[in-house]
Amino acid sequence: MIILDLGCGKAKAAGSIGADLYPLSGVDLIFDLAHPPYPFAADSVDVVHLRHVLEHMEDPVEVLSEVWRITKPGATVNIRVPHYTGPFAWRDPTHKRCFSSKSPLSPDLQSVWRLGAIDSGSASYVQ
């Protein structure tokens, strides 16, 4: 099983391959998520974690499209983003956007992803 933690920083998910822009402790692969393609074959990843990443991206739909390309059918994509009403949503000057439970995280959420679970600020999707 291939588990990928995109934008992991120093907090890589246990058992995952950590990818980040910076060579931090725990990072296994260094590349820019804003410039696909990612160094994974199509339909090759079982689980993707995107924790506090999409709010930093100029084009989160492009990131999610690439995640869709690399994930296997039935893969799980765990997304955590700041809610626009949260106390830390706009404190970070590198945040380009914030999200709500109604934010579309793909061009056509209903046909591309099946929502697996959602709580305040995080969602799991199954391809």
Image (spheres, rainbow, N blue to C red):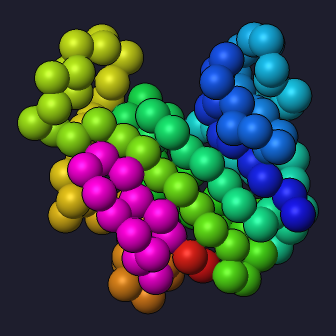
Residue 58 seen? no
Q: Quadrant of residue 32?
A: top right
Is residue 124 shown above or below 28?
A: below
Q: Residue at x 25, y 50 (%)?
A: 120
Q: Residue at x 55, y 45 (%)?
A: 50
Secondary structure, magenta segment, majority class:
strand
Residue 122 lies in the magenta stretch:
yes
Is residue 121 shown above or below 57?
A: below
Left-right relation of 7 to 14: left
Q: Residue at x 45, y 34 (%)?
A: 52
Q: Position of residue 84 (x, y in %)?
A: 16, 38
Q: Quadrant of residue 7?
A: top right
Q: Nearer the viewer, residue 76 or 41?
A: 76
Is residue 31 shown above or below 9?
A: below
What segment is highlighted magenta in the picture?
114-125
Residue 6 lies in the magenta stretch:
no
